[in-house]
Image: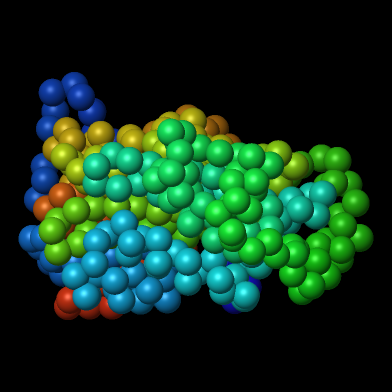
Amino acid sequence: MKRRSFFKLGILGGVGGTLASHNLFAGNQPKTTKSINPYNSGKQPLVLSTWNHGVAANAGAWDVLSKGGNSLDAVMQGVMVTESDRSNRSVGISGMPDRTGHVTLDACIMDWEGRSGAVAYVEGYEHPIQIARQVMEQTPHAMLVGKGAEAFAAKLGMPLMKTPIPEVEKEYKEWIKSNPELIVKPIINHENHDTIGMLAMDSNGHISGSCTTSGWAYKMAGRVGDSPIIGAGLFIDQEVGGAVATGLGEAIIRIAGSHTVVECMRHGYTPEEACREAVNRIIKKNKDLTGLQCGFIAMNNKGEYGYYSVYNGFNVAVRNEQMDRLLDAPFDRKW
Ligand code: ASP
């Protein structure tokens, strides 16, 4: 699979820029009738994930959920499918490198008890999500980065792999040749990313989430985006629900994106309205929206879900007992 371009047009289109932002926390509770999705209600197993690769990832998660497994195992197994996909250039071992040629991976995981684990800037391990889970389960910490995270993975017996894979290395060398000036002057390339973020509810109604990425292709060495940061790339609070983000991590970090979505749901927004509010904040805070795509997906503890993005082109894989589909997200503006 080639890295997805955000310029790809959505099939169903979106709502355009007509929806006003809610006056959150100012006593104006939003109407909650909109975006209650007819496809899911109650505490049935449900899995949502970002982008086209979410369909295969959801199948991995569904193997766990359909057998009565818990949502934590489901979100780990689900995104491991994407991490292992040798054709995926934005997640896992086949991801694109930074501008110095190193493939550095970020991931985090969170469960319904509010436990979380994360790793960032990890090189040479196929499943950063497994390392993140072990950080959560075996250490007193919430995040390990770089060499420390790699040493921890080695200690767990995880095999070290060589990155970039040969195909990616070839692409990288061609990129350097054709963009010598970009090596010194970072420019955001909005065509080269696409994190897998996943939210799952199990048959007990417990919600967990995971997020894993190689980040932006040709990022500066040392750059970490939103994806491994709890509250930015992912946030779960079983009292309310969960959210995951994808897109330009810098903009998502600056509004504490996933936490914002969950807090909006806490204050009465539907999942779609909450995602739209986070998108609106990004739009308000960034004068130049060129290439600034961000998307959020969310589910609440009633099993309702929604999603929203800055631009058209974002899609979400949804699977439950009734359906297994890739849906186009509503958006604020068209490319
Ligand atoms: N959010 C990721 C990052 O900034 C990239 C993406 O989701 O497209 O690293």
Q: Residue 165 lies in what quarter of the image? A: bottom right
- In-front residue for pair 139/250: 139
Q: In the picture shown, does residue 20 fall above or below 102?
A: above
Q: How is the image coloured?
A: rainbow
Q: Is residue 195 left or right of residue 235?
A: right
- The residue drawn where x is 49% and y is 31% is 254
Q: Is residue 303 left or right of residue 249?
A: left
Q: Position of residue 173 (x, y in %)?
A: 87, 63
> How many discs appear?
0
Q: Position of residue 190 (x, y in %)?
A: 62, 53
Q: Is residue 16 visible in this depiction of the protein? A: no
Q: Quadrant of the N terminus?
A: bottom right
- The residue drawn where x is 40% and y is 54% is 210
Q: Residue 15 lies in what quarter of the image? A: bottom left
- In-front residue for pair 280/92: 92
Q: Is residue 84 visible in this depiction of the protein? A: yes
Q: In the picture shown, does residue 240 fall above or below 200?
A: above
- The residue drawn where x is 55% and y is 54% is 156
- Residue, far top: 26
Q: Residue 117 lies in what quarter of the image? A: top left
Q: Is residue 142 left or right of residue 61?
A: right
Q: Position of residue 215 (x, y in %)?
A: 61, 51
- In-front residue for pair 9/147: 147
Q: Position of residue 335 (x, y in %)?
A: 52, 57
